[in-house]
Image: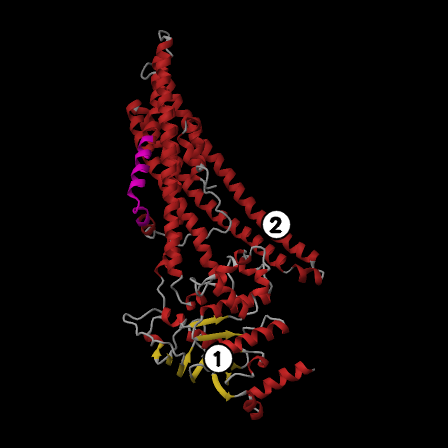
Amino acid sequence: MHGEPPERELSDTPESLPEAAGDAVAAVLPEDSEPGEQPAKARSLAPLRMVFGAALQYPRQIGFALLALVITSAATLAIPWRFKVIVDEAFTSGASTDDIAHAFQYLLMIVVILGIGTALRFYYVSWLGERVVADIRLKVQNNLLRLSPGFYEVNSPKEISSRMTSDTAVIENVVGTTVSVALRNSLTAIGGIGLLIFLAPSLTLGLLIGIPLVIAPIVFFGRKIRNVSRSSQDRIADVGAYVTEVLSAMKIVQSFGQQQREGERFASVVEATFDTARRRILLRAAMTSVVILLVFGGVTLVMWRGAIAVTTGEISGGTITGFVITGGLVAGALGSLTEVYGDLLRGAGAASRLAELLEARPEIAAPARPERLPEPARGSLSFRNVTFRYPARPETAALKDFTLEIEPGETVAIVGPSGAGKSTIFQLVERFYDPQGGTIRMDGVPLTSADPADIRARLALVPQDGVLFSANARDNLRYGKWDATDEDIWQAARAANAETFLRALPQGLDTYLGEGGTQLSGGQQQRVAIARALLRDAPILLLDEATSALDAESEQLVQQALDGLMANRTTLVIAHRLATVRAADRIVVLEDGRIVEQGTHDALSKAGGLYARLASLQFTGAAA
């Protein structure tokens, strides 16, 4: 949980000191990754430069965090020293109650300093973690908004969303916890070893010799456990994928009576997950027993040697007490450091994936000196010998030697079978892509010479499915003209036959429409999208099956409104239902990316070509 300090962050507190050796055991054993966490791809820490560069933008917070870090490390090491003094001075037969009080008062003062320092350190490192993640997310999102749609053909939006969530969570852990833990434990280990040498040089020498003997088998077997842990997470992912698949198709499962079979399939997936988990548990259990034997066996030997030294008068009882506590702190610190590198590698992998998004450059960008579109806008469009292939399908041409002249104010319908290239024309007009051959001009200016923002400012689009956002009705309607007044909004809604149901909403224009506009029916969503395009009041109107989701009565009313608005605009209409384009000034028939026919509805119907065949199928079927 983000609101609570990580458990390892609280190990400075006095209550955890007796558990230091146990912490060392837990620290060196690989922790299971969270479900859905992607394994780190990076094998170096170089990608973390981006993360630390972002953190360096806040030197004041870094300074406070480092100061608190030094204070807490010093206070941690002061505790065993204070215990030495207490045992040697306060527990002697000649000690007075005042001596005992003073000894413990100093210890309490150290504990207070430790508590305050730990709180300050946790606040500042957590603040840095959250702030760095927020900055990286903002930078990545701003860059993603600049990238052309072609980027999202080859990069899954779901995978990008995962990077923005799970990968940034890993980075937050690195900045807000891992680095702090590494620095704190390094200081504690270095200072603790120095204190051990000061307290008992001979015992310290034996301890330092024994540490590698403990760490070596832990590192060796730890790799095996990590591999099994990854396999276990893969099996857990299989369970999640299976559940999602079956639950999303529950109607089909029950319709075909396959509940028992799906239950058996799920049982096999669960058993495979259990078998992998069992192997992981056995390895961890065996590893834990070995580590406990090595760690506590070593501590026992050191205390044995220390007890002999106390009895012979070589060292005092307080010295051995301080030595054991300090040794536990050093062991815990060194144990924690063994996992830091793995955490940093995971962070580097996450940073590299985010850096890919941050460094991506838009294929469609404004030229260094964009040519201005003429004012006032005329609304003409020209396609000359255009050939285009989508980046994800370079072997297939969506348009082939396509030539079309569209005059200002003309209504042109584009029809043809699925895959003929109709939607591609819209994509090119909006300059989401550039053609590989030929030129496209708007009001005489080549699109590649103009600023894409200027081009799109002269376009209004109604997509086939009314795309709405998780916002209120007002913000969805004015999305293309943010400074529109409520009066302008209602006028556009009236023209799109959307006023009645919008006024009936519980809070009117302030009503939240839900994710993707789920509070509205499909036809209502489409009419909101039409009103949004009308409100933009652009000289060129792009209608991609704009009435496809409307019932017959609403379609007739909206079509009448659109007919009046098209009179002063250049309009391109993609249509599958040919009844909606009979009145177009010109109908362009596409097949396999080429124009095979063009003319009016009557002329094309009489020509007996592709359009006549399509019209015959639709109108005869409708009549039947």
Choose top left, top right, bottom left or bottom right for residue 65.
Answer: top left
Which residue shows up at 50% across the image and 83% down it? 590
Q: Residues within 10 Å of mark 1 (few under 14, many from 20)?
A: few
Q: Earlier in the sequence, mark 1 or mark 2?
A: 2
Residue 531 picture location, percent across and down: 51, 68
**Left or right: residue 271 compared with residue 361:** right
Which residue shows up at 55% across the image and 60% down it? 517
Q: Residues within 10 Å of mark 2 (few under 14, many from 20)?
A: few
Residue 537 picture location, percent across and down: 45, 71
What's under tag 1, amino acid-wise? Answer: Ala
Task: Magenta stretch: give its range.
Answer: 53-71
Q: Is residue 519 above or below residue 83?
A: below
Residue bearing the label numbered 2: 271
Q: Residue furthest front?
A: 487
What's under tag 2, amino acid-wise? Answer: Glu
Residue 437's disc number: none
**For residue 68: magenta?**
yes
Residue 526 picture location, percent across and down: 55, 68
Residue 315 picture location, percent across and down: 32, 17
Residue bearing the label numbered 1: 567
On the rendered image, what quadrant is the C terminus found in? bottom right
**For residue 414: magenta?**
no
Q: Which is more toward the observer, 442 or 50? A: 442
Q: Which is more toward the observer, 98 or 563? A: 563
Q: Is residue 98 above or below residue 112?
A: above
Choose top left, top right, bottom left or bottom right for residue 617.
Answer: bottom right
Q: Is residue 78 above or below residue 62?
A: above
